[in-house]
């Protein structure tokens, strides 16, 4: 009996869990444990920001290579190894006793994150046809939203139960979960539909499958494309701005907003709930109105969220900021992943996403360290948040000059 169920949905579910571990736990877990970890290791704001920077430099170092390795050796293997490395890095982070050790292990965690997250999103382009890629990647990035919800509820309880060592226990738990996800990825993921005798979900003609099989790896199509470079430059703004907001979200609420760890966790969880469908919604919007228009709108929303966090330091301002960021949080990575699929096709999409993620990673690596220095210099995190808002506005301006990449208008060619 013929069934309408497609294995692509299983790929999407596991891919979402990969993002949950690679970004949600490995990166955003730091946001929730930062105040306790900063106290436990005696770090100032610059050092706290530098730990995030170390993690993001590690991510940057593997973002391009991870995508290229996935294009050559297959996403399944690269994702599995990446998650395993991230799990080891988180375990060792929990054992750190000083800044230098913590920085080294946060960098190792970032290496694993970069090696697993980029191929996970790129894999979806092989399993879903172009007109559904924005929707698919939009679901995939909700792994980060699920993590915000889980972390916002879970971490305050662990910190309260284990006292000064609570932040270490958190990292040990994050590590165990991520290693379990590595095993799951190796067991379930497949590199392309043809491995199971299938075609991409939504394929209506032979050409949509044949193109994936016969296309050679034309690396120049990735690295010499002007529009791909433009995408990368726009992506810098997101990396720099959002990571400042996410890194110091809990610290700012506790240190300058009068929040407790538990109440900050509740707001973090609220942001997660609002972000749960943002990738799906904005992926669909970008499929409908075009990637360019969607990017401009999202950048403006995020700039507003960052500005409100700094300029309205009270509960209404914090809540509105969290909601605005939540409804747009992971939309830009989803749109970028879909755009790379539009421009480069399924087989090179991971390499293209890895290349633009290099720019994203540069912005991420610079953001926390700069923000921490600004905070120590000004004795407040508000100026750093305003800097994030300004950079997000630059992202909107840069998006205005982007050549349209809507599937309807571009037909997927550079």
Image (cartoon, grey):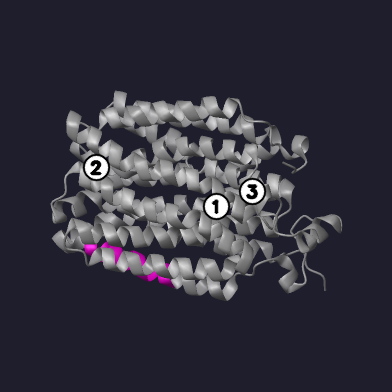
- Coordinates of residue 310 in the picture (x, y in percent): 30, 27
Mark nearest the camera among 3 and 1 is 3
Binning the other alpha carbons within 10 Å of mark 2 as few (below 14), some (14 to 19) or many (20 upward) gives many
99 vs 341, left or right, is left
Compared with residue 118, is residue 377 higher up or lower down, i.e. above or below?
A: above
Q: Nearer the viewer, residue 390 or 37?
A: 390
Magenta span: 167-179
Q: Secondary structure at mark 3?
A: helix
Binning the other alpha carbons within 10 Å of mark 3 as few (below 14), some (14 to 19) or many (20 upward) gives many
Check disc 1 and report the residue beneath it.
Answer: 354
Mark 3 to mark 2 CA distance (whole Å): 39 Å
Mark 3 to mark 1 CA distance (whole Å): 10 Å
Q: Secondary structure at mark 1?
A: helix
Task: Identify the residue at image location x=45%, y=32%.
Answer: 302
Q: Earlier in the sequence, mark 3 or mark 2?
A: 3
Main SS category, magenta section: helix
Q: Is residue 372 magenta?
A: no
Check disc 2 and report the residue beneath it.
Answer: 251
Q: Give the image quarter of residue 58.
A: bottom left
Task: Identify the residue at image location x=18%, y=35%.
Answer: 376
Q: Earlier in the sequence, mark 3 or mark 1?
A: 3
128 vs 182, left or right, is right
Question: In this view of the protein, can residue 276 be seen by the observer?
Answer: no
- Coordinates of residue 382 in the picture (x, y in percent): 26, 29
Mark nearest the camera among 3 and 2 is 3
Task: Identify the residue at image location x=45%, y=30%.
Answer: 392
Q: Secondary structure at mark 2?
A: helix
Check disc 3 and report the residue beneath it.
Answer: 222
Binning the other alpha carbons within 10 Å of mark 1 as few (below 14), some (14 to 19) or many (20 upward) gives many
């Amino acid at each position: 009996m013929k069934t309408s169920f497609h294995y692509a949905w299983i790929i999407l579910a596991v891919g979402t869990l990969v993002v949950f571990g690679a970004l949600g736990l490995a990166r955003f877990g730091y946001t929730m444990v930062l105040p306790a970890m900063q106290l436990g290791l005696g770090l100032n704001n610059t050092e706290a920001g530098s730990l995030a920077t170390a993690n993001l430099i590690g991510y940057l170092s593997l973002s391009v290579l991870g995508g290229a390795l996935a294009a050559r050796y297959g996403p399944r293997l690269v994702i599995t190894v990446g998650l395993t490395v991230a799990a080891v890095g988180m375990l060792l982070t929990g054992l750190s006793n000083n800044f230098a050790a913590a920085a080294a292990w946060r960098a190792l965690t970032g290496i694993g994150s970069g090696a697993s997250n980029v191929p996970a999103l790129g894999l979806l382009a092989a399993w879903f046809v172009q007109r559904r890629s924005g929707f698919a990647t939009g679901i995939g990035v909700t792994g980060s939203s699920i993590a915000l919800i889980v972390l916002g509820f879970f971490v305050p309880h662990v910190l309260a139960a284990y006292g000064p060592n609570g932040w270490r226990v958190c990292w040990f738990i994050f590590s165990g979960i991520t290693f379990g996800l590595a095993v799951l990825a190796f067991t379930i993921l497949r590199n392309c539909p043809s491995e199971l005798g299938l075609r991409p979900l939504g394929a209506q003609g032979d050409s949509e499958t044949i193109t994936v099989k016969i296309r050679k790896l034309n690396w120049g199509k990735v690295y010499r494309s002007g529009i791909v470079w433009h995408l990368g430059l726009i992506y810098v703004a997101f990396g720099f701005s959002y990571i400042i907001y996410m890194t110091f979200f809990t610290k700012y609420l506790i240190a300058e907003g009068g929040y407790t760890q538990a109440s900050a966790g509740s707001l973090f969880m609220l942001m997660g709930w609002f972000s749960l469908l943002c990738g799906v919604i904005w992926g669909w919007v970008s499929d409908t109105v075009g990637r360019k228009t969607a990017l401009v709108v999202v950048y403006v929303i995020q700039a507003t969220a960052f500005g409100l966090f700094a300029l309205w330091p009270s509960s209404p301002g914090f809540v509105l900021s969290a909601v605005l960021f939540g409804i747009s949080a992971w939309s830009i990575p989803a749109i970028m992943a879909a755009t790379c699929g539009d421009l480069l096709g399924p087989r090179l999409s991971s390499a293209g996403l890895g290349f633009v993620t290099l720019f994203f990673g540069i912005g991420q690596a610079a953001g926390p360290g700069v923000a921490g220095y600004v905070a120590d210099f000004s004795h407040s995190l508000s100026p750093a948040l305003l800097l994030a808002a300004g950079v997000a506005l630059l992202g909107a301006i840069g998006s205005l000059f982007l050549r349209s990449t809507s599937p309807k208008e571009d037909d997927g060619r550079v």
